[in-house]
Amino acid sequence: MSLRDRLRKYAQQNGPVRVGLIGAGQMGIGFMSQTEKMDGLRVVATADIIPGQAEKGYLESDVPADAVVHLDENPEKASELIAAGKRIATTDASFLVQIGALDVILECTGVPEVGAQVCYTAIQNGKDVVNMNVEADATVGYALAKMAEEKGVVYTLVAGDEPGSIKELYDFADALGFEIVYIGKGKNNPLNRSATPDQLQESAQKQFMNPKMLASFVDGTKTMVEMTSIGNALGYPPEVTGGYGPTCTVKDLPKVFAPKQAGGIFEGAKAVDFAVGDVAPGVFVIITTDQPKIIRDLRYLRLLGNPQHNYWALYRPYHLANLEAPITVAHVALDQEELLATHRPPVAETVAYAKRDLQPGEKIDALGGFTVYGMIERAEKARQHGEVPLGLVVGGTITRPVKAHEPIHYDEIELNQNQMIYRLRKEQEKLLGY
């Protein structure tokens, strides 16, 4: 039975899968719009901190205006309205996750602290959580996965974002018994570590994007946190700070993403990295085998390979991000199926780097802003050097000068210890025995 048929059957028996959406920005509204074209799955409650933004999201997704009710309190009333076919709009995410008539919570803000708050509160309320906030997952994903296990609920990242799309390729190759030597993604934008929202304002407007979101793509932060999440889930660290990030064509993937003795760039195996060039917006895994018949068959089947060495690329040329995410939500609701989460000790960290010279007294602004960007690092090295995870620095105050393009250390910043993400990080470190 197809997934669409299963959703139809579920809806006939129970009504549609009811989703609570946190964040009605570009990603959230796209998700909502896609679900309105589906059978058996609907966003029935939406929270966004900007007044009127949740309502705007519904209208842009072709939900009738008379179906939308604004509510910021009384979860029981919200459940009654949802049962009557209404959609809830609110500015309070903590209120939304308390609504009983919700099957799955989707976190879609991209703000580390908000992601930590939402995921933690939803899990504590016994709700399954689908997280599109890789910024939060890269920082406290291990703690959230452990908490979800204890509560008997699902915590997972999504299909469509690069980590989830990589995981789908990985699962395919892994099930067949291939050795998976490298995993990675293409980078969509030219890399400029100093990029700021002001510099990208015009480009962002043309793409109907938030300038901060675009800046987080261009300065590399988004790529770094995505690689951290998938690297931690699968146990694939980066080999070097920031990754190699070679310029590479699709056809050369199995030549470049190979050990040095095979003409590639890597010292060892089982690493995560990214490629600049026509690989974007795709994802890939590099496989190998030593079985002679399988080698002959892979060559016969013309899988994208290295002609001199036994390495092949499984490459997917797209990821549909928010538009694909409903697939994960459906699998969570119907099957309690997790796609991607970190259940092993993390091997990667996205560390905060200064985007410009920072002076004592300066506060760190949002990701994709004017003060910091992220760089992937081996978790053990980051811990030994006292480098601060990117997800912890927002709202912190610099206490010692930090030069541009240098990592921020714990003794150079006063962190906001009142934030949920800080408390979850401390819990994660306790779980790991650090």
Image (cartoon, helix red, strand yellow):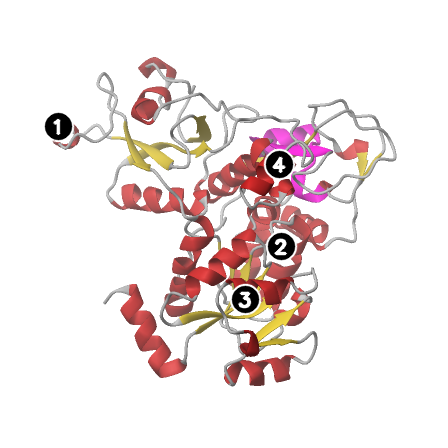
Confirm or deny contact between disc 1 and disc 2 (CB under 8 A).
Answer: no
The answer to whether 209 is drawn above or below residue 12 in the figure is: above
The answer to whether 162 is drawn above or below residue 126 in the figure is: above
Marks 1/2: CA–CA distance: 47 Å
Say which amino acid is labelled 2: Gly
Q: Earlier in the sequence, mark 3 or mark 2?
A: 3
Q: Earlier in the sequence, mark 4 or mark 2?
A: 2
Residue under label 1, please give it: 296
Residue under label 4, please give it: 202
The answer to whether 179 is drawn above or below residue 327 in the figure is: above
Quarter occupied by residue 291: top left
Tag nearer the camera, 1 or 4: 4
Marks 3/2: CA–CA distance: 25 Å
x, y percent for residue 61: 49, 64
Residue under label 3, please give it: 59
Marks 4/3: CA–CA distance: 26 Å
Residue under label 2, please give it: 115
The local crowd at label 1, few if under 14, some if 14 to 19, many if 20 or more residues have their Cα within 10 Å, is few
Query: Would you say residue 74 is visible in this rendering?
Result: yes
x, y percent for residue 343: 49, 50
x, y percent for residue 165: 39, 45
Q: Earlier in the sequence, mark 4 or mark 3?
A: 3
